[in-house]
Amino acid sequence: MAAKKKISLITQIAIGLFSGVIVGLLLNYFPDQKGWLVAQVLQPAGDAFIKLMKMIIVPLVFSCMVVGIAGSGGRSLGRVGTKALVYFFSVTGVAIVFGLLVGNIFQPGVGADFSSAVTSTVQAPMQAASQGLGNVLLGIIPDNIIAAMAEAKLLSVLFFAIIFGVALSNLEPQKRLPLVGALQAVADTMFKVTHMVMAYSPIGIFALIAVTVSSFGIHALLPLAKLIGVTYLAVIVFAIVVLGFIAKLVGENIFEIIKAFKDELLLAFSSASSATVMPQLMAKSEVRGVPRNITTLVIPLGYSFNLDGASLFAGLGTLFIAQVYNIELALADQIMLVFIMVLTSKGAAGVPGFMFVILTATLTAAGLPLEGVALIAGVYRLMDMPVTALNVLGNALAPLVVAKWESRSLNRDESVKGDAETRARPQEQ
């Protein structure tokens, strides 16, 4: 007897969303039962999901960030790895800014006010404009890191994790490796915990959506349709304009790259999974002239640090949630969001359900409603497809950029060396 095929998590989440919509609509027809069912069953079940997501963020992001910084000892990446990281942080930062820009232009969440449905503790947004940049930056430095962790002050935790990771990377291997190994075990354990939390997510999303629809009606979900359309538009424009400009700078054509990697892009789009195409990316990059030592370093590293699509959606999704809950973010607040997302996206990359982790971490750090994660999660599969394809396209372009950068550096070094030798010859005579 053939074993039953396991239903994927994203399918379970979609089922939870549609079931929640149906239950929410039914509750509008049975108001006598609505009050008790919402207060005693649905709201607690939804709040449990919010609390579970908050529970995993600090240990997960801290351990991943420290291991990511100290795991290589800070030395083994060399010049190519350093250039790759500089490129990754630059382009993903641009992707986040682009996502925020698109969100401000099209405002997919404007018109739906869910502020009365927020039950988790919502702090005022960062209010960087009123506090002043100096005070905001000073507030990131924790007086007590244990207290910062207990209060889920994620920016302070990330700040300490970076300093701790850099310091740890400079220890002798015999002192560094045991602690890195212990923190890697913590990170791996948190991956398992995240799996457990994500297994509960369909129930939590079902409950939260049911409460939302019962309170605001089916029209409450209409902004999600706009978000889906805006996401597809943003991905296409970013790929052609931004990545196209970067490709042109290194003598490449983005449409030729898309054509060369079309099979991998289609597979990533249809499956919403980029892991399966990594070997093909490496092989085709070598065919296009990228040295093997660059492809074997840059592409695997890019799968953790160069997620252009995920970074773009992190900016767009976060702004959408703020708009849905009628929370205005000033320009200074959005600048701070870029800083937050650059860090949280790197600290959570590779984690199962990492986009939900990134959004939760960002919302926690910014003091925005975590209920918005459930709102997006129900339809995220439809947006995950173009987002994943953009991740793959970005990682197809990255080794070409790094190879060209490295080639220019080597040529410049050889030129300088040649000039020095030429100048030295008369003296030797």
Image (cartoon, helix red, strand yellow):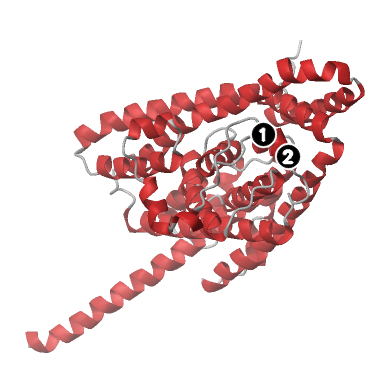
Considering every residue shown, the one lying at the far right of the view is 29
At 63% across and 56% down in the image, what residue appears? 99
Considering every residue shown, the one lying at the far front of the view is 130
At 24% across and 35% down in the image, what residue appears? 176
Q: Pick whichever, 347 or 284, lies toward us.
A: 347
Q: Is residue 264 visible?
A: no
At 45% across and 39% down in the image, what residue appears? 154
Residue 114's disc number:
2
The quadrant of the picture occupied by the N terminus is top right
Q: Is residue 186 visible?
A: yes
> Is 83 above or below relative to 59?
below
Q: Position of residue 39 (x, y in %)?
A: 73, 19
Secondary structure of the residue carrying tag 2 is loop
Dot 2 amino acid type? Phe
Q: Position of residue 5 (x, y in %)?
A: 73, 21
Dot 1 amino acid type? Val
Residue 217's disc number:
none
At 82% across and 35% down in the image, what residue appears? 216
Quickly name the residue at label 1.
118
> Is 265 above or below relative to 381?
below
Contact, CB < 8 Å: mark 2 with mark 1? yes
> Is 15 above or below relative to 95?
above
> Is 191 above or below relative to 129?
above
Q: Position of residue 384 (x, y in %)?
A: 68, 43
How many numbered marks appear? 2
Q: Pick whichever, 404 or 50, lies toward us.
A: 50
Secondary structure of the residue carrying tag 1 is loop
**Gap between marks 2 and 1 measured at Cα:** 7 Å
Q: Indicate the quadrant where residue 417 lies.
A: bottom left
Q: Indicate the quadrant where residue 183 lies.
A: top left
